[in-house]
Image: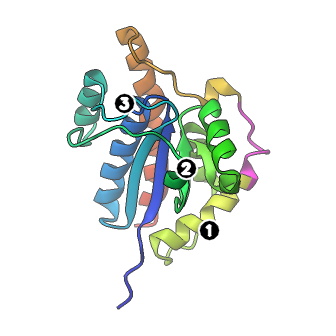
C-alpha cells in the first residue's frame, strides 16, 4: 500500500502570533476531522515575534472554535520554509506580495485566505481522487477564477488585531472564521 504524503498548507501573517496561527489551527482541526493525516498545516510570519506563543485573545478564539492553541511557537518566514509547500495562504495582499518576492515560483499556489475561500467553492474536482491530488488539481482552477472574481483589500485582507481593541479582535474573527469554514466546506463535499 502506498502512503501519500500530506498536502502541505502554510498560512502567513506578520508576527505569527494572531492571524496566521488562528487560520493554521482552525484549518488543521477541521481538516483532521475530515481526513486525518492527509493535511499538514503550519504558519509563519513576515516579521515574526519568533519563539512567542499565540497571543492570549487569539488562543481563546482558537479554543472556542475547536482548535488547539497549545504547543505553538511563532517562526520567521524564510525561502527554505516556503519550499515544499503545496499551498500558501497569506492573511493580506501585502503578505502575498512578500511571499512571492521570496519565492516567485509559488505564484500559482499562493492566495490570500479570504480570496481562496471566495474562489474555491466554484471549483469542481475529482471526487474519487486522494485529497492531495484533488487539491493540486483544484488550485489552478481557483487561480483561473481570480480574474473573473476580482476583489479589493477589503475583501481579501484580514485586519491585524495585535495590541488593538476587542472590536478589532472580533473583526479578525469575523474575517477568518467564515473563510476557514468555506475552505473546509469545499473539502467536506468530497467526503
- Does 146 appear in magenta? yes
Magenta residues span 144-151
Q: CA distance from mark 1 to mark 2?
A: 15 Å
Q: Is residue 1 above or below residue 165?
A: below
**Quarter in which the C terminus is drawn:** bottom left
Give me the residue at 64% from left, 45% from top.
102
- Does 121 appear in magenta? no
Reading the chain from its start, which is encountered first: label 3 or label 2? 3
The part of the image, by quadrant, that contains residue 181 is top left
- Badge 1 marks a residue whose secondary structure is helix
Q: Disc 2 marks which residue?
A: 88
Whole-percent x, y for residue 55 in the image: 30, 25
Q: Disc 1 marks which residue?
A: 137
- Kindly report which numbered mark, 1 or 2, lies closer to the viewer in this rendering: 2
The part of the image, by quadrant, that contains residue 97 is top right
Q: Residues within 10 Å of mark 3 (few under 14, many from 20)?
A: many
Residues at discs 3 and 2 in contact (Cβ within 8 Å): no
Q: CA distance from mark 3 to mark 2?
A: 17 Å
Q: CA distance from mark 3 to mark 1?
A: 31 Å
Whole-percent x, y for residue 15 in the image: 44, 28
- Closer to the camera, 17 or 169? 17
* Res. 124 visible in picture: no
* Res. 55 visible in picture: yes
Q: Is residue 122 above or below residue 68?
A: below
Q: Is residue 11 above or below residue 49?
A: below
Instruction: List the single residue furthest toward the right.
Output: 147
Give me the residue at 52% from left, 54% from top.
80
Q: Disc 3 marks which residue?
A: 17
State left or right for residue 34 relative to residue 152.
Answer: left
State left or right for residue 56 relative to residue 173.
Answer: left
Amino acid at each position: 500500500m502506498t502512503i501519500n504524503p500530506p498536502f502541505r498548507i502554510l498560512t502567513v501573517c506578520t508576527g505569527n502570533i494572531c492571524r496566521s496561527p488562528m487560520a493554521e489551527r482552525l484549518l488543521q482541526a477541521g481538516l483532521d476531522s475530515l481526513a486525518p493525516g492527509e493535511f499538514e498545516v503550519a504558519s509563519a510570519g513576515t516579521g515574526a515575534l519568533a519563539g512567542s506563543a499565540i497571543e492570549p485573545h487569539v488562543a481563546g478564539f482558537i479554543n472556542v472554535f475547536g482548535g488547539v492553541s497549545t504547543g505553538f511557537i511563532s517562526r520567521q518566514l524564510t525561502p527554505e520554509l516556503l519550499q515544499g509547500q503545496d499551498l500558501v495562504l497569506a492573511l493580506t495582499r501585502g503578505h502575498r506580495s512578500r511571499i512571492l518576492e521570496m519565492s516567485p515560483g509559488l505564484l500559482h499556489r499562493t492566495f490570500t485566505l479570504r480570496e481562496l475561500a471566495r474562489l474555491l467553492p466554484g471549483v469542481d474536482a475529482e471526487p474519487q481522487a486522494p485529497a492531495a491530488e484533488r487539491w493540486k488539481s483544484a488550485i489552478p482552477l481557483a487561480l483561473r477564477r481570480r480574474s473573473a472574481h476580482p476583489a479589493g483589500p477589503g475583501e481579501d485582507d484580514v485586519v491585524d488585531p495585535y495590541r488593538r481593541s476587542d472590536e478589532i479582535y472580533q473583526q479578525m474573527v469575523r474575517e477568518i472564521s467564515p473563510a476557514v469554514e468555506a475552505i473546509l466546506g469545499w473539502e467536506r463535499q468530497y467526503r
